Image (spheres, coloured by chain):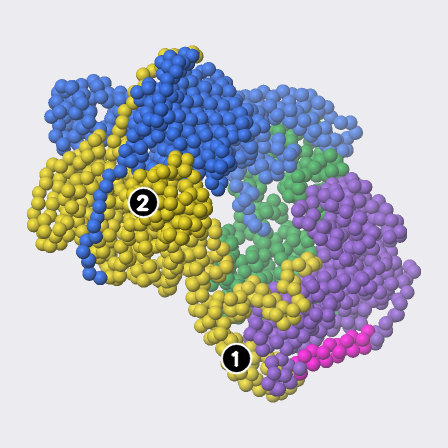
Chain colours: A yellow, B purple, C green, D blue
């Protein structure tokens, strides 16, 4: 083949909404069931975010109504989805763009929120429009006085809202936003995930009142269990470790500061005079140098130095809004009703300059939790329901925890709840389904998980120790009379010796010992004692171990491997 | 019932080193029994006194952990070292096995008193009559071994037998000591399928023999072949089928035949490391029975099947498994295996990595093993 | 060597239905042998002639596939149906087993001619002397069963014995027919550990007995207990230890004791479905041996341990495993299990889902099994 | 808690390049090693796409040079990456936007290409810029006369190129493009993936000359093995099944057609007069109705009908460019050197209106392929190297193929090469690493895989059959003399019978039979014969099976379950 004449190549530009319209799978709208689920979720999250930013106790209602039968196509059906909240509302001037423009929103900040990409709501509206050609209706009251209601379409090619109707009416003083859209969906297939989503959301937002009204009119209410709310997250300055060349250039461009030292304290998270000075000396810059005087090469050098300097303080948590023990406890107790619950909230940490906090809870027993370990994952209070096996938390719990250490029975009924909050959650996809295994995140998850497992282990050991007391009494009561009998007969005596005093003494003594031990459980001693009790439950293996152990205690010359290494014959 | 002596009295009879009279046999048995009963009783008395003093009774006995099993190169067997373990009823972890051990002493005492035998399995179930129980037979077997260690006596002396079925054949007249058969005599060449070595044979006294040696083989099939090919006549031999690893009662029997009748013992086992070890355990005892004596035949000779025979006789072989090889390597480090043939043959096993068995000689016809192999080996044995 | 008769001649001796003279025994043995040799020779002749005619020789014999194993309710045992299979040397898939079968016939012919016995294992190895080989013993065992089917004769008649070790004890005088012991007699009560039932005992003739019944037990421990408790005297019984599932030679022996001496047979096995089946196989044979006769004792009685005994005697029990339960359900559908006690006890097993064993009676002391249980059962057996 | 006063909420808009700058993990730039790999890959793919669109036999060079030691930061180092091709070049006026603007490009068409999202090259440049602050240098000659060279940065906030230098010089007549950028990367960690990428690319583009020059100066050449190229893909009209409401609205807006019938034939893929008429009657529209007269509700109704009408022709493959057997064969032979290779090219199929073709190849044996099944995945000629376990092809091969059917030994050395080409590949992420399990795709992969496994199975059976002849001769030669001997001795004869004729006849006969059988392998008969040969190799299990089988053949009353179901005793 000889190269033929060039074919005509044409170039074109597309808008962001066009891009996501064409590639909607990327945002979680890959099929009618997933699209319905994603729409519900994105809009509910917008509502919760709005309430929490405004420190309002959230009240959110999600209503899914079936459209007319005629609108059916295969397993799909038109659904009318209405999400209403009591949030702060949106100013009328922002209303069209906030919902009708991709890459426009309130979430492009270094601040914790459920939304990350600022386009979930718009994508839901876009998807509704391209499947049903119906306008979305948005109502919002921002000032408590006037409710603005818009009927709106999106001009996808231009990435801009097209307003069909704009009405106003008086409010009764309440603020809030309501979005009503009509989309093709597959509720039958999506129902389970939607229910899971609400159920799990209720675990981490026990301070919210959430109602779900399904197409049959059935109402499921997730009622407020506490009025305690996490503090609203605030915006933060970037941490030095998170700065790249582009970011530094932008900061310099905006900066009015006269010296690099001042520039640093003014623009970087947790950098004071002392740290700035130390850093500049480390990086080889004059502290009095003007930021704008840095050359292109200087900027790169500066950034590299930022990443290598080891004395920056870790980011603080002020910009983060973890749930905290109280709220998480309330959520777990309310939704899972376990016999035992424990929490571990890790101190703030950071990856690539983004602060994050890991919180892990464990729930054990009760009637709701099935046997085996169940994992509930959350990131910035969003339940993550898909692709569990790809998630870093799954990896940690399955591969990196030595469960044997904690002596928790394999089939114990356990739910582990992980919550990662960050100004930037390291999702692997726009669909927000699982977290990347960043080493820092992995480490924190591991530490927190170990912590809660220790707590559960202690609980189980104490629980066992109570039963231990009773059993011990039984054991002495059982064997001492037998010993007396066999000794008497073997010795050819007539009268039994008086062994009852021994019985009484021994039991008191043992009780004291057990009490001490259980106070610092779980320990090998405790478990070895337990094990010897277990003989009575016919578990010979354990029994033999403990037997050998005890012999060694008293005859230190003995070696514990005795049985295994003995000659085969 | 009365039995006549065997009829082949024209042959040269082996002189009994000390021909025991019927009376002697009875007296010895009675003495042994009294001694044992006294020992058991003292266990009970000690516990009884402790209880009366408000003390928790306890047993002390030699530890059977590996670190306390040492090789006695004089005795040429494993023995227990000096470490003792204590089992106290005052320890919540010990009280159960302590009670079991005391019960077993009590039960053995009854058996000896009543002149009954029982099996390991019987012991496991018998405990229930006394509100004692064992999780499984492994647990009661373990306690039986503990009592052996406490008393330094084999369980067979306590009338507890395992269910094992080795057999004997050859010109040996014995006299029973078991109840109902006291004084009865039997010649062990009268039944060509062989006699089971059970409680009554184990406790019988030897009266008379024309045999000049003992040949122990590992397998019933070869035992039958040897009888059929009249090895007992050709070699003036008493034949013993160890049925695999020789049971203790059979090892005890071999020792008595060797010591009391002054007969040399030759062992022929399968051509693999387990076969070699079967021979070794007859000669030097096992680590498991380090707490006991009188179960070894230090002068016995292992005559085959050697690893070198696999090569020499071009026997059909199988490859050694990983486990076989591991076992061979372990045995190489075993102090019983020092010297001559033992190390040499292990080395060859490890080199050729093949194994075989006694029946493999059938490749050359059924009689080859007797007409050729055994002949070669008995010749060779003279130089061992 | 000569043996005197047992000395308890004062007891009422069992009348032998037809007392065989020494000569008779010999004559019968000789006839049997000639018949067998003729049968083997004809196999060779057929193949030889086929080859000479340019035809591929072949064997035809009854198929042993499940569909061809049918229950004969008259014989009360499994027999093979009418389907034959053909094994032709002209088929590439058959030529190897065909050759093996022919070799085995040739080998058996030699054994019978030479008056030698061999074991299953010997056969496996012996093939190599003839450039034949078997992948493993399972393959040669399969061919041996094929030859049994071709000849309608048990392998024991071909002088091929498995290595199995069941035992017998009691007042029975036998006369050997094996070479070197022809005419020798032995009374089987002379050795209280019991006599192994091997090739020589299997082929011996019965001379005299005072026994009135046979009691077969599943285990050596119980056998020893019965001897010790003098069950043979108390019940005038010959005791047999089947050592688990009774080997064919033992079943053959039981049948002969039953038929020739007209003695009733009672079976006492463990209290589980396998125990029940051990009894059943003695009575009605196994499907595996559907191609053979003369291995059943249709009048034998299973007297225990029944599932109902577990409840009645409050025995220590273990839970039945999944496999146990599945086995019980299979047996319920088995035609041998029609009627009375068989179905009833299976139902109880399936209801209580527990199992036990003979030794469990030790819970009530070692002699309970004889003094109480056996007594009850022999009483009960009268109505069976 | 009482709802406090609303916090100030601020809104902002960001540009597409800003979005992907902030969320660069989404495009495969999550860390320095992955970023280096992705950059190489995106630029090489742009080059290959350009050549193929212009029917030029591709020559691509990829050079990775280490930057100065001083530019090192941790495991990262500055690398200078230069990708040059002999493609058609890019017109000077498009040059800045093609490389400096996200969502601008030549790939937003219904046409098969490696690129899908039109932003890979721009993202590589953006990433380079934010890590090293260096301009990218782009040279291109479009007309064969003048080479334009640009030094360029991207204004990320504005999503537009900033040209620092523009030079021109004369060309020697060759067209082509070269991109040279400086980025921070981790070559040590990326090296293996980069090498795999080139190696696998060579398998599916055997008509390309590709060179890789690594930082040590080592040159790896993947030389052209064939001049045959797949036909260049062409653009296509949308298939009715792929139309949504938005798409239909746009088409109507642009349409000048006077009737719906004409509108359909003009705008839809493979819709002629007859189909259009049938459809319109099915959907309840007048064929003469004017497209622009459709109401909003009509549009939805029309679209639903499009999705439900079952008589549209499937998309044709004219817009697709599968590799075809010849090229795939050449690629596999060249790179894997197997003992056996087979291909299966499926007819075109479609999901949601997007046409696709599945091609699957299998390579067996040879020195390069290790034991076990290895999967090489391609989509639009791109090797997919990450997240194999999530891919639909992995699922098909591991879970949905009954390997036993094909009697291929478990540890056979096999490589399976899957290639999916489509106008829209259903990637699950922007990173283009694995394909979604669309049922249509799954079905085609399954069919193709079964096809190649059948072919391999036949090959292996034939191979076995040759060896079978020899073995059979040996078997008769071995056993017949033994039969003669045993029969003679048993019958008490002196002279051996004459069995030699039998031997001769039998062997001839069997040879014929075997020849027949092998011609239609693999069949049970063949394999059962093989099995009986295997006895000689001491595989008893198989042997027993075949024995039973053969008995049954001749005694039909027999049941094959004999052994297993026999009484346990």
Q: Residue at x 76, y 37 (%)?
A: C129
The residue closer to the viewer here, D509 or A242, is A242
Q: Mark 2 or mark 1: which comes first in sequence? A: 2
Q: Residue at x 84, y 59 (%)?
A: B299
Q: Is residue B377 above or below residue D96?
A: below
Q: Residue at x 68, y 66 (%)?
A: B64
The x and y percentages for residue A26 are 32, 37
Circle 2 SS class = loop
Would you say residue C277 is visible in this rendering? Answer: yes
The x and y percentages for residue D221 are 52, 23
| Residue topped by disc 2 | A257
Q: Residue furthest left?
A: A169
> Label 1 neighbourhood size at 10 Å, few (<14), some (14-19), many (20+)?
few
Label 2: chain letter: A
User: Which picture quadrant has residue A228?
Assistant: bottom left
Q: Residue at x 21, y 48 (%)?
A: D9
Question: What segment is highlighted magenta in the picture?
Answer: B25-45
């Amino acid at each position: 083949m000889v190269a033929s004449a060039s074919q005509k190549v044409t170039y074109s530009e597309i808008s962001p909404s066009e891009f996501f319209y064409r590639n909607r799978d990327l945002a979680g709208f890959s099929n009618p069931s997933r699209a319905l689920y994603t729409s519900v979720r994105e809009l509910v999250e917008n509502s919760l975010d709005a309430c929490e930013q405004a420190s309002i106790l959230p009240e959110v209602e999600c209503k899914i109504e079936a459209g007319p039968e005629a609108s059916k196509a295969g397993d799909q059906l038109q659904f009318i989805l209405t999400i209403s909240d009591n949030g702060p509302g949106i100013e009328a001037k922002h209303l069209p763009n906030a919902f009708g423009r991709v890459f426009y929103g309130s979430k492009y900040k270094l601040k914790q929120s459920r939304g990350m990409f600022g386009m979930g709501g718009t994508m839901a509206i876009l998807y509704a429009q391209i499947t049903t050609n119906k306008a979305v209706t948005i109502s919002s009251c921002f000032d408590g006085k006037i409710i603005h209601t818009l009927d709106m379409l999106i001009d996808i090619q231009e990435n801009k809202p097209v307003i069909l109707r704009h009405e106003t009416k008086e409010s009764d003083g309440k603020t809030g936003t309501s979005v009503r859209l009509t989309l093709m969906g597959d509720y039958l297939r999506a129902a389970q995930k939607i229910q899971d989503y609400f159920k799990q959301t209720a675990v981490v937002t026990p301070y919210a009142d959430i109602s779900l009204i399904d197409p049959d009119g059935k109402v499921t209410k997730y009622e407020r269990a506490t009025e305690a709310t996490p503090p609203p997250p605030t915006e933060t300055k970037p941490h030095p470790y998170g700065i790249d060349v582009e970011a530094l250039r932008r900061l310099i461009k905006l900066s009015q500061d006269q010296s690099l030292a001042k520039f640093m304290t003014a623009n970087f998270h947790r950098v004071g005079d002392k740290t700035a000075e130390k850093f500049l000396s480390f990086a080889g810059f004059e502290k009095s140098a003007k930021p704008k005087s840095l050359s292109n090469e200087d900027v790169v050098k500066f950034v590299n130095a930022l990443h290598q300097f080891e004395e920056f303080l870790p980011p603080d948590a002020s910009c983060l809004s973890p749930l905290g023990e109280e709220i998480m406890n309330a959520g777990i107790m309310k939704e899972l009703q376990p016999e035992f619950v424990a929490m571990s909230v890790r101190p703030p940490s950071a990856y690539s300059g983004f602060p994050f906090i890991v919180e892990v809870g464990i729930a054990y027993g009760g009637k709701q939790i099935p046997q085996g370990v169940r994992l509930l994952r959350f990131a910035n209070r969003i339940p993550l329901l898909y692709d569990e096996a790809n998630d870093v938390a799954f990896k940690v719990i399955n591969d990196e925890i030595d469960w044997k250490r904690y002596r928790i029975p394999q089939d114990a009924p356990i739910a582990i709840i992980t919550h990662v909050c960050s100004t930037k959650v390291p999702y692997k996809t726009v669909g927000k389904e699982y977290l990347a295994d960043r080493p820092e995140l992995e480490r924190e998850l591991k530490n927190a998980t170990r912590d809660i497992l220790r707590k559960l282990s202690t609980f189980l050991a104490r629980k066992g120790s109570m039963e231990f007391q009773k059993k011990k009494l039984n054991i002495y009561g059982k064997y001492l009379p037998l010993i007396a009998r066999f000794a008497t007969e073997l010795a050819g005596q007539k009268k039994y010796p008086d062994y009852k005093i021994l019985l009484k003494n021994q039991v008191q003594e043992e009780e004291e010992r057990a009490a001490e031990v259980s106070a610092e459980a779980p320990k090998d001693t405790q478990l070895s004692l337990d094990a010897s009790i277990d003989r009575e439950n016919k578990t010979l293996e354990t029994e033999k171990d403990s037997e050998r152990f005890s012999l060694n205690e008293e005859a230190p010359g003995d070696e514990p491997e005795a049985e295994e290494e003995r000659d085969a014959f | 019932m009365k039995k006549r002596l065997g009829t082949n009295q024209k042959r040269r009879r082996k002189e009994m080193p000390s021909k025991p009279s019927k009376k002697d046999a009875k007296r010895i048995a009675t003495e042994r029994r009294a001694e044992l009963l006294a020992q058991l009783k003292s266990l009970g008395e000690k516990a009884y006194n402790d209880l009366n003093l408000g003390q928790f009774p306890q047993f002390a006995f030699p530890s059977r952990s590996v670190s306390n099993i040492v090789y006695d190169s004089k005795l040429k067997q494993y023995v227990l070292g000096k470490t003792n373990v204590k089992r106290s009823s005052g320890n919540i972890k010990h009280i159960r096995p302590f009670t079991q051990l005391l019960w077993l002493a009590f039960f053995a005492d009854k058996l000896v008193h009543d002149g009954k035998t029982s099996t390991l399995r019987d012991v496991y179930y018998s405990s229930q009559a006394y509100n004692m129980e064992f999780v499984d037979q492994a647990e009661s077997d373990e306690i039986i071994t503990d009592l052996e260690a406490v008393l330094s006596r084999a369980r067979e002396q306590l009338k507890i037998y395992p269910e094992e079925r080795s057999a004997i054949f050859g010109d040996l007249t014995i006299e029973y000591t078991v109840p109902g058969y006291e004084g009865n005599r039997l010649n062990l060449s009268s039944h060509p399928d062989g006699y089971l070595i059970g409680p009554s044979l184990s406790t019988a006294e030897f009266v008379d023999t024309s045999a000049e040696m003992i040949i122990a083989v590992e397998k019933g099939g070869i035992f039958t072949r040897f009888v059929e090919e009249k090895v007992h006549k050709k070699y003036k031999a008493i034949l013993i089928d160890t049925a695999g690893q020789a049971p203790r009662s059979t090892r005890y029997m071999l020792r008595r035949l060797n010591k009391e009748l002054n007969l040399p013992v030759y062992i022929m086992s399968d051509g693999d490391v387990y076969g070699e070890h079967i021979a070794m355990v007859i000669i030097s005892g096992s680590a498991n029975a380090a707490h006991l004596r009188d179960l070894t035949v230090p002068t016995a000779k292992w005559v085959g099947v050697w690893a070198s025979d696999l090569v020499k006789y071009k026997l059909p072989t199988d490859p050694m498994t990983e486990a076989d090889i591991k076992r061979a390597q372990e045995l190489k480090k075993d102090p019983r295996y020092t010297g001559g043939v033992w190390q040499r043959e292990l080395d060859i096993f490890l080199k050729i990595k093949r194994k075989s068995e006694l029946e493999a000689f059938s490749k050359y016809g059924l009689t080859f093993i007797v007409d050729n192999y055994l002949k070669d080996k008995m010749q060779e044995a003279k130089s061992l």
